Image (cartoon, helix red, strand yellow):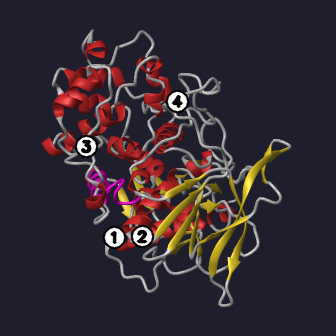
């Protein structure tokens, strides 16, 4: 145990300072002050609050099964290198989860029953940032080569986790990415101020040094330049892992949807990330000087908010169809479940307005076909469904609308259709207990198999899928499998 009385000595959460809002809105850097080094005394003090409880529910809250009490104890004892080893024992990319995961581990922290939980996420990111700074993160090359080859289609967190595990097991792994850069949603979906891409690049370099091969601009199952046919894919590789993500956006089928100035959130965020990367786009979507409305109050909506404010939007309003969540757990969300609470993210504290129980019923469109506003009604409930309440319509001015209502599944055309893999009614890739699809030798993991989910679930599924592929190729495996297909978070 770190400090037997640590949770009594320190009863509050301490987090790194954020840069002042007016300053951080002028650039795309992460919002935290000197996060790479952190205030180590604060981090150690927070780690000392870990109670080393008899049954650490943080293990169950995290699908990776992170050894949280162990590395909390090591941080408290100032053994940061061993803390990094324990952190990497279960998580390939703690610098990603430490920045972009909503931390269900903290929701299930036993201390959280009657005190603010341990700042697990900040301890995690402090460990990995120090590990990179000290040079402790080194390539782990395989000790032998199996002579078997695996193609991983998609370079998001699930694909990268599967690729790294399989490379270390001795297989020849090639990651095929349709975009011009690697990283999937890590690269183009998450804004720079939330995850600086240098963190992605340095991890990709480690993977290259271990032997993983990467090919960008490869559209598997496509027809244009850089396309790779399914026949070539199956011929060249002994196994295939599909980790293409759930990229089909949930649509809003209301009058005026086709107006100019209405875009999906991912279209907007991808272009914004490309601009930060230095790409020259002919007519990029920009919020500069515009009245922006974001439909959807989740993490993607918050990412759009922070991006629009940095681009110089005149105003930003976020619409959520549900009620405003409670500030604290209520009886419907008991510990150790991950509750839906009213939170002020770094983007929300930077500006913008939030409106709840708001149902968009249509768009105002001018004579030139451009959006000028939204028809918004108050949300009611009918037959267990959220529906607009008649007679409550108002018009909200807007000349840029971003739809951030989530995703419905993986794209079936092209790769999935050509492979002939079975799809579920939810639009995800169907798979069995061994992560294998309906096509022998083709496996799947991440959002394209699970549906839209958290980065920590994507990494966990990528690791588990890698174990299944290794067993398929070799008849057995020593790779860990933290989750089973279809496993769900802690619920009541």
**Residue span colored magenta:** 191-207
Residue 286 position in % (x across, y down):
45, 76
- The answer to whether mark 1 and mark 2 are in CB contact below 8 A is yes
Quadrant placement of the C terminus: top right
Q: Which residue is mark 2?
A: 272
Q: Which residue is mark 3?
A: 17
The label nearer to you, 3 versus 2, is 3
- The answer to whether mark 4 and mark 2 are in CB contact below 8 A is no
Q: Which residue is mark 1?
A: 276
Overall secondary structure of the magenta section: helix
| Mark 3 closeness class: few <14, some 14–19, many ≥20 residues within 10 Å | few
- Note whether 219 is above or below 41 in the view shown: below
Precedes in sequence: disc 4 or disc 2: 2
Quadrant placement of the N terminus: top left
Q: Which residue is mark 4?
A: 328
Q: Dot 2 lies on which element?
A: helix
Precedes in sequence: disc 1 or disc 4: 1
| Mark 4 closeness class: few <14, some 14–19, many ≥20 residues within 10 Å | few
Q: Residue furthest right?
A: 383
Precedes in sequence: disc 4 or disc 3: 3
Q: Dot 3 lies on which element?
A: loop
Rendering quarter of residue 72: top left
The label nearer to you, 1 versus 4, is 4
């Amino acid at each position: 145990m770190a400090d037997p009385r640590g949770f009594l000595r320190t009863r509050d959460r301490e987090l790194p300072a954020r840069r002042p809002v007016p300053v951080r809105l002028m650039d795309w850097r992460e919002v935290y002050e000197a996060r790479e080094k952190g205030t180590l005394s604060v981090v150690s003090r927070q780690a000392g609050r870990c109670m080393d409880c008899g049954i650490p529910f943080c293990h169950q809250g995290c699908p990776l099964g992170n050894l949280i009490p162990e590395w909390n104890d090591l941080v408290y004892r100032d053994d940061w290198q061993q803390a990094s080893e324990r952190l990497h024992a279960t998580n390939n990319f703690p610098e990603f989860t430490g920045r972009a995961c909503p931390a269900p581990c903290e929701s299930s922290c036993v201390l959280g029953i009657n005190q603010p939980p341990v700042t697990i996420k900040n301890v995690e990111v402090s460990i990995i940032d120090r590990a990179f700074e000290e040079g402790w993160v080194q390539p782990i090359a395989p000790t032998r080569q199996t002579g078997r080859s695996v193609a991983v289609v998609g370079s998001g967190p699930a694909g990268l986790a599967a690729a790294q595990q399989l490379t270390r097991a001795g297989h020849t792994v090639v990651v095929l990415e349709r975009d011009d850069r690697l990283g999937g949603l890590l690269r183009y979906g998450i804004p720079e101020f939330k995850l600086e891409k240098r963190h992605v690049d340095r991890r990709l370099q480690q993977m290259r040094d271990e032997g993983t091969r990467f090919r960008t601009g490869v559209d598997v199952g496509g027809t244009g330049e850089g396309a790779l046919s399914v026949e070539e894919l199956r011929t060249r590789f002994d196994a295939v892992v599909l980790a293409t993500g759930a990229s089909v956006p949930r649509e809003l089928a209301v009058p005026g949807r086709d107006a100019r100035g209405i875009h999906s959130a991912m279209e907007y965020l991808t272009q914004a990330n490309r601009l930060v990367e230095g790409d020259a786009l002919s007519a990029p979507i920009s919020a500069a000087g515009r009245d922006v409305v974001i439909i959807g109050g989740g993490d993607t909506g918050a990412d759009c908010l922070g991006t629009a404010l940095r681009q110089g939007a005149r105003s930003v309003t976020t619409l959520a169809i549900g009620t405003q969540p409670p500030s604290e757990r209520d009886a419907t969300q008991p510990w150790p479940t991950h509750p839906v609470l009213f939170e002020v993210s770094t983007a929300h504290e930077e500006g913008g307005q939030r409106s709840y129980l708001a149902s968009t019923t249509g768009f105002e469109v001018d004579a030139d076909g451009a959006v000028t506003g939204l028809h918004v009604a108050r949300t009611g409930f009918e037959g267990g469904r959220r529906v607009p309440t008649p007679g409550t319509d108002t018009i909200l001015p807007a000349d840029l609308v971003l739809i951030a209502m989530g995703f419905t599944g993986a794209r079936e055309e092209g790769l999935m259709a050509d492979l002939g893999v079975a799809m579920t009614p939810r639009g995800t890739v169907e798979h069995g207990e061994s992560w294998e699809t309906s096509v022998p030798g083709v496996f799947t993991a991440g959002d394209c198999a699970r549906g839209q989910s958290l980065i920590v679930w994507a990494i966990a599924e990528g690791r588990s899928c890698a174990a299944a592929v290794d067993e398929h190729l070799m008849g057995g495996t020593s790779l860990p499998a933290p989750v089973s297909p279809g496993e769900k978070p802690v619920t009541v």
